[in-house]
Image (cartoon, rainbow, N blue to C red):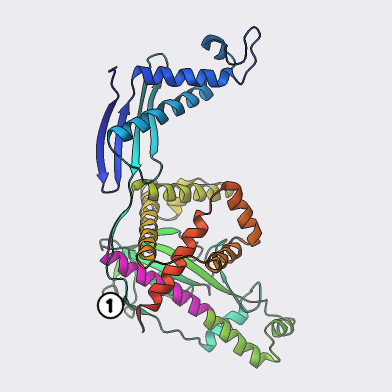
């Protein structure tokens, strides 16, 4: 091996650099020496002072995997710092490292590293964004439907995060037709009231779930270029909400009337109509947010480091795998049930993660461009929303974040919320 560290550099995109590094013998032996010394201090060997036992003795008391991991950490950390300095790279965040070769006998260590650089954003015009959203109406049939449904609590809109879509749920559905550019189109839909194939497809799906299906769009469908045609499409659920109501029985009027302060059934129906209207307004807002962000994505140029969206995608896939395991299934089974090969399933999750990261970067850029600041009230509001979403007390969220020394999610949510309020206030919204 050369006495000089070998580095190969590759520009993966404007925000990601890949380094392939082959360490020197000195770097490898030095890393193993430090690993041995570390474990020598932790064990008690008869006849030797702590930290002074020779390698051949220490190795008998240490798990080989632990030793290799400790040595790899020492070698890669030092070599990574030297490589970044030699290549004049200033990372935006921690590199993603993959160890490819490590041998104590041959004094070899090779690894690759993806180096994230600062995101690059060229914002399109974000003031006065023109969007169209469905006009909000509530029919008597919808009120009757809600009366007939089993609900948990009277008259309160709830974001659905722990189950699949049921009939009557309000969902923002993204449909991306095969062969078309862009991130798909969003529709605010009521499960059971769209059209047969779409209703069947979205029933049981959860927020952020992806499914590939073939849809025969009705001739009356609102997107004229799809109306009356059969299309292969990818469906993604952006958000789901339900109007929580008690069971319709003899006790219904008393309990619901008491909670909603309704004196009789007629007034109760009026109250229910108000609550359904509020739920639709909330989902209409979600739909508007999606439309604004979709327009901004079209008009802006956004480059983000691969490590950002890969981390998000990997986390989501781990969560999906855990949910599948609880049902006695593998992730491959979930992919098959969604009408996709496993590779396509993973690729779709990665694409979705990239879009979400790009949106977050756009929001953060607008936040900085407009000189916005977060107040304690802003943070408290987001904290309460997080607590409601996870079904815990706000204090538990705070304790968890303090324990992990990570308040990033709370800050990201708060920035996003503040920016979306700003964009809505400056958008040109037309109800159709």
Residue 228 horizontal side relative to residue 43, left or right: left
Asked which quadrant contains residue 88, the reply is: top left
Q: Which secondary structure is most common in the magenta stretch?
A: helix
- Could you say where residue 212 lies in the image, as x and y percent from the top left? 38, 59
Q: Quadrant of the image for the N terminus?
A: top left
Q: Residue furthest top?
A: 47
Asked which quadrant contains residue 398, the reply is: bottom right
Q: Is residue 432 above or below residue 59?
A: below
Residue 168 horizontal side relative to residue 100, left or right: right
- Could you say where residue 79 lies in the image, as x and y percent from the top left? 37, 28
Name the one closer to the observer, 52 or 300.
52
Residue 323 horizontal side relative to residue 131, left or right: right
Q: Is residue 197 above or below residue 279?
A: above
Residue 146 horizontal side relative to residue 13, left or right: right
Tell me the magenta residue range: 279-303
Other residues around mark 1 within 10 Å, as few (<14) / some (14–19) / many (≥20): few
- Could you say where residue 373 lies in the image, as x and y percent from the top left? 45, 66
Residue hosting label 1: 224
Name the one closer to the observer, 105 or 414.
414
- Could you say where residue 195 lies in the image, as x and y percent from the top left? 41, 74
Name the one closer to the observer, 190 or 380.
380
Q: Is residue 392 visible?
A: no
Q: Secondary structure at mark 1?
A: loop
Q: Is residue 1 magenta?
A: no
For image coordinates 30% across by 35% down, the residue present is: 19
């Amino acid at each position: 091996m050369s006495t000089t560290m070998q580095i190969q550099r590759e520009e993966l995109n404007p925000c990601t650099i890949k380094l392939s590094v082959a360490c020197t013998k000195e770097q490898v032996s030095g890393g193993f020496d430090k690993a041995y010394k570390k474990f020598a201090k932790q064990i008690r060997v008869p006849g030797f002072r702590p930290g002074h036992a020779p390698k051949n003795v220490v190795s008998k008391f240490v798990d080989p995997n632990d030793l290799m991991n400790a040595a790899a950490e020492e070698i890669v950390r030092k070599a990574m710092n030297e490589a970044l300095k030699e290549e004049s790279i200033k990372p935006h965040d921690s590199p993603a490292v993959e160890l490819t070769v490590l041998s104590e006998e041959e004094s070899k260590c090779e690894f690759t590293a993806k180096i994230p650089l600062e995101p690059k954003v060229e914002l399109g015009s974000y003031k006065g964004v023109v969007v169209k959203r469905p006009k909000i109406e509530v029919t008597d049939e919808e009120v009757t439907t809600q009366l007939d449904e089993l609900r948990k609590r009277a008259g309160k809109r709830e974001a659905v995060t722990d189950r699949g879509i049921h009939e009557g749920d309000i969902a923002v559905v993204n449909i991306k037709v095969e062969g078309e550019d862009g991130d798909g189109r969003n529709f605010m839909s009521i499960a059971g009231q769209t059209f047969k194939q779409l209703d069947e497809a979205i029933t049981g799906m959860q927020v952020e779930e992806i499914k590939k299906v073939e849809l025969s769009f009705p001739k009356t469908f609102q997107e004229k270029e799809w109306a009356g045609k059969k299309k292969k499409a990818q469906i993604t659920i952006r958000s789901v909400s339900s109007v929580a109501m008690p069971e319709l029985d003899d006790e219904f009027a008393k309990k619901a009337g008491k909670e909603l302060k309704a004196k009789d059934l007629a007034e109760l129906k009026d109250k229910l109509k108000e609550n359904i209207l509020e739920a639709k307004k909330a989902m209409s807002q979600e739909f508007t947010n999606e439309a604004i962000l979709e327009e901004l994505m079209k008009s802006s140029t956004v480059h983000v480091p691969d490590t950002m969206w890969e981390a998000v995608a990997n986390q989501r896939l781990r969560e999906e795998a855990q949910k599948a395991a609880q049902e006695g299934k593998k992730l491959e089974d979930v992919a098959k049930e969604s009408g996709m090969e496993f590779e396509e399933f993973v690729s779709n999750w990665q694409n979705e993660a990239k879009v979400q990261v790009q949106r977050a970067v756009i929001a953060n850029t607008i936040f900085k461009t407009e000189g916005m600041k977060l107040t304690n009230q802003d943070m408290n509001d987001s904290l309460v929303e997080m607590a409601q979403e996870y079904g815990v007390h706000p204090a538990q969220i705070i304790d968890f974040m303090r324990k992990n020394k990570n308040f990033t999610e709370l800050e990201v949510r708060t920035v996003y919320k503040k920016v979306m309020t700003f964009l809505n206030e400056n958008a040109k919204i037309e109800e159709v």
